[in-house]
Image (cartoon, helix red, strand yellow):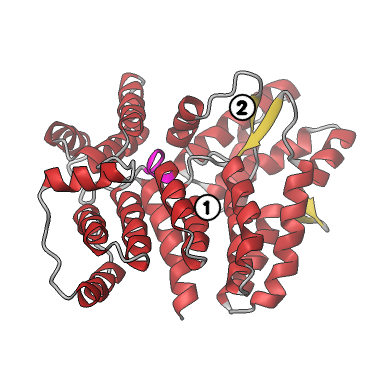
């Protein structure tokens, strides 16, 4: 069902009370957001805008548009230019979008804006980045992604140092999104800053919610240790990376490492793996709080009998733990669950892969 059909369906549900209509549309928008239905969210948003008094409507449009173009559609223009390798043309648009976001959605003493994409991120952020002095206001679009893309464009032109504060700003808008953290790590790899690669990796591992994200963290450490000649320790991180989630680039990096040290890479024991990682203040495996949030979320959804969201949280939990009991529960709820990959994790990994493909082509 496209956006126009959803609008017709929502209009049919509307009555004579503006207050009740607003309440219904907000509830529908939340449901569409949980389902990842962007057309549904936009449809509900358009109808909510219609209900607003003219003065309030103008203010909302000012906050959510540039030159009459809604911010998500403005961002789509940047992405299309990036896909066509028109980096120089894309940068001024991305810079303007960045300035719009950071000016109109700046934090205050009592509140800050966050772009949390799903209930898991919302819960994890509340626990890991709790701020007693400021409330969290949700942004209408994924500002962390928008700002990260601007930084990526700068990196493509060689402006690595300029990209650092921009990526830090992206992290502020979504501190539990690994995307901007990985881009920041790439910058520090490019300028061979070993200390900051390790620091950013430690922080990323605290919010990494998929095996692919954990594997990339370990591969990043393996890369920087190779650069600094710490070959044996680098091999441990590379082996850990492929154990969590194979990636076609890592075997090539491992071959390069083996050539440099002159001996094959041998799989270390788990005890050695843990010992080497501790040397760099890095824990082996997923963060316990990430697992706890995913497990608690799945439990809450099961109690509410919200099976689609329960399955998503259970898949997240299983991917991190490989717990057979969790797997059996997933298969009981959905016997056709061929891939135990939650929608959020899959989307995040695909987005990262797409950016890498753009860079390679």
| SS at mark 1 in the image | helix
> How many callouts does the rendering have?
2
- Residue 207 drawn in magenta: yes
Front-most of 61 and 200?
A: 200
Q: Secondary structure beneath disc 2?
A: helix
The magenta segment is 204-208
What is the quadrant of residue 96 in the picture?
bottom right
Write down the residue under mark 2: 24
Residue at left 33%, top 24%? 296
Please tell me which of labels 1 and 2 falls first in the chain: 2
Residue 9 location in percent, x, y?
58, 41
Q: Position of residue 73 (x, y in %)?
A: 67, 59
Residue 237 point in image, percent of width and height: 26, 55
Q: Is residue 7 visible?
A: no
Structural crowding at the residue carrying mark 1, measured as other residues with C-alpha within 10 Å and reported as few (<14), some (14–19) or many (≥20): many
The reply to whether residue 226 is visible in this rendering is yes
Position in image of residue 309 (x %, y %): 37, 34
228, 208: nearer the viewer: 228
Q: Which mark is residue 88?
A: none
Side of 204 relative to 141 (left or right): left
Q: Residue furthest front?
A: 229
Of labels 1 and 2, the one closer to you: 1
Asked if residue 46 is among those painted magenta in the image, a careful observer would answer no
| Label at residue 180 | 1
């Amino acid at each position: 069902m496209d956006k126009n059909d959803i609008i017709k369906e929502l209009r049919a549900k509307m009555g004579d009370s503006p207050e009740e209509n607003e309440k219904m549309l907000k509830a529908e928008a939340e449901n569409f957001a949980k389902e990842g239905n962007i057309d549904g969210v936009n449809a509900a948003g358009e109808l909510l805008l219609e209900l607003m008094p003219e003065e309030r409507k103008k203010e909302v449009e000012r906050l959510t548009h540039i030159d009459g173009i809604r911010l998500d559609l403005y961002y789509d223009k940047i992405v299309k230019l990036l896909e066509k390798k028109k980096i120089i043309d894309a940068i001024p648009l991305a810079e303007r979008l960045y300035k719009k976001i950071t000016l109109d959605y700046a934090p205050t003493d009592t509140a800050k804006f966050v772009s949390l994409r799903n209930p898991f991120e919302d819960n994890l952020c509340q626990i890991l980045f709790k701020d007693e002095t400021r409330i969290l206001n949700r942004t209408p679009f994924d500002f962390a992604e928008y700002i990260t893309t601007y930084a990526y464009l700068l990196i493509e032109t060689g402006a690595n140092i300029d990209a650092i504060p921009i990526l830090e700003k992206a992290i502020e808008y979504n501190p539990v999104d690994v995307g901007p953290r990985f881009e920041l790590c790439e910058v520090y790899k490019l300028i061979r800053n070993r200390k900051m690669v390790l620091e950013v990796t430690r922080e990323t591992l605290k919010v990494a919610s998929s095996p692919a994200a954990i594997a990339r963290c370990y591969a990043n450490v393996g890369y920087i240790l190779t650069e600094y000649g710490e070959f044996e320790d680098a091999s441990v991180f590379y082996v850990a990376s492929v154990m969590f989630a194979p990636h076609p680039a890592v075997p090539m990096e491992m071959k390069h490492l083996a050539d440099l040290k002159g001996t094959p890479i041998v799989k270390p024991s788990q005890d050695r793996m843990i010992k080497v990682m501790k040397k760099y203040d890095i824990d082996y495996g997923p963060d316990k709080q990430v697992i706890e949030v995913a497990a608690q979320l799945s439990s809450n959804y099961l109690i509410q009998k919200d099976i689609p969201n329960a399955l998503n949280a259970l898949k997240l939990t299983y991917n991190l733990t490989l717990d057979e009991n969790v797997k059996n529960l997933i298969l009981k709820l959905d016997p056709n669950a061929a891939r135990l990959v939650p929608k959020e994790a899959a989307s995040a990994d695909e987005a990262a892969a797409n950016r890498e493909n753009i860079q390679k082509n």
